[in-house]
Image (cartoon, rainbow, N blue to C red):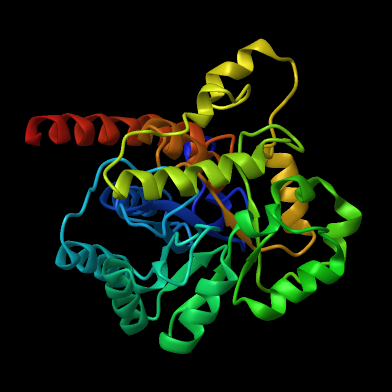
Amino acid sequence: MNDFLLPQGKAAALLPGVSFSIPGLFRFSDLIFSCLEQVEDKFSYHIPVRFLYGSPLVRWNCGRLLFVPHHETLEEMEAELDNAVRHGVTPLLTFSSPILTQEDLADPVCNGLLQILDRLHGGAILASPLLKAYIQKHYPNVSLHSSIILTTFAQERSPAYYQSLSQEYDYYVIHSDDKFDLPLLRQLPKENAEIILNERCNFQCPQRREHYLSIAQDQSTLLDGSCELSNFLARCPFIPEHKQIQTQRRNIALTTREAAELAGLGFDLFKLQGRLDSPYVFFFDFLHYALEPELAFPTMYPIFSYTIQQYLKNKRHKS
């Protein structure tokens, strides 16, 4: 009879002892908290989400190009950040534009968000040394997280480089190409490192820098009222992911075996991308990496897919 019982507690986890940094802030955080509750009800296991990241439509945003403001007022944005803290999760803002100027630092909405983050002891994901120094001076309670965008523009990603990131930032992210370099990974500080699990770009993509710069420039262009965008993805051979059907090369998303190997090296903070993905795609990835693969994941994902379906239906009705 016990053969028909579901795993409980940490037996339901794919990677016991690790925690997650996931997207969804300002997008579908209510779905995330519903997912955590349902998993706990089903498996007596609370998926340890340490950070929830994202951004409203603001000038300092990067990583993903945002078109539509999901939270119009600073009060609405504050309520979103407060809600994450009430659920025991630290909110992070993706202030990762690499092209900020001294004038950009005066942006009133971004500074208003930093004031809220400072009160909540939240964090910011950064790629601009200028913004990093500004936050350190004016908002000392905001934790500093290096962005993969920062590592993309590094001249050399050596052990010494990552050591310096580990010392300069509260948390640092390892470049996605480097997560396959086990000799390098063994030399890196583990206590504040972050590994990206599900990036679907090409290995050693030669267009990565141009892609990030196009996002940052297009975000500013949109906010300045122009529609003349770079349309970078039209020229990208690998993203969106449906283009990958034309190649037999794998992307750089980690398999569950590879993720477990990195956890075995001592890495215990794993990041997922996908804040602009369909919720079905994002929660597949999230539960795929969070739950034991034989029973927990195949049991939970179909159940939660129904919750996603109802969520999207209600959202359509409201709009």
Closer to the camera, 170 or 284?
A: 170
**Left or right: 243 as drawn, with respect to 36:** right
Residue 275 visible in image? no
- Farthest residue to the right: give it: 183
At which x and y percent is residue 278? Answer: 38, 32
Displayed quadrant of residue 138: bottom left
Displayed quadrant of residue 195: bottom right
Residue 224 visible in image? yes
Closer to the camera, 66 or 213?
A: 213
- Farthest residue to the left: give it: 318
Quarter of the image that includes the C terminus:
top left
Report the residue at 61% width, 54% height from top: 149
Report the residue at 17% width, 62% height from top: 76
**Left or right: 254 as drawn, with respect to 312:** right
At which x and y percent is residue 298? Answer: 49, 31
**Left or right: 115 as drawn, with respect to 166:** left
Q: Is residue 162 above or below residue 318?
A: below
- Farthest residue to the top: give it: 246
Q: Is residue 132 above or below residue 291?
A: below
**Left or right: 263 as drawn, with respect to 34:** right
At which x and y percent is residue 88? Answer: 36, 71
Closer to the camera, 256 or 253?
A: 253
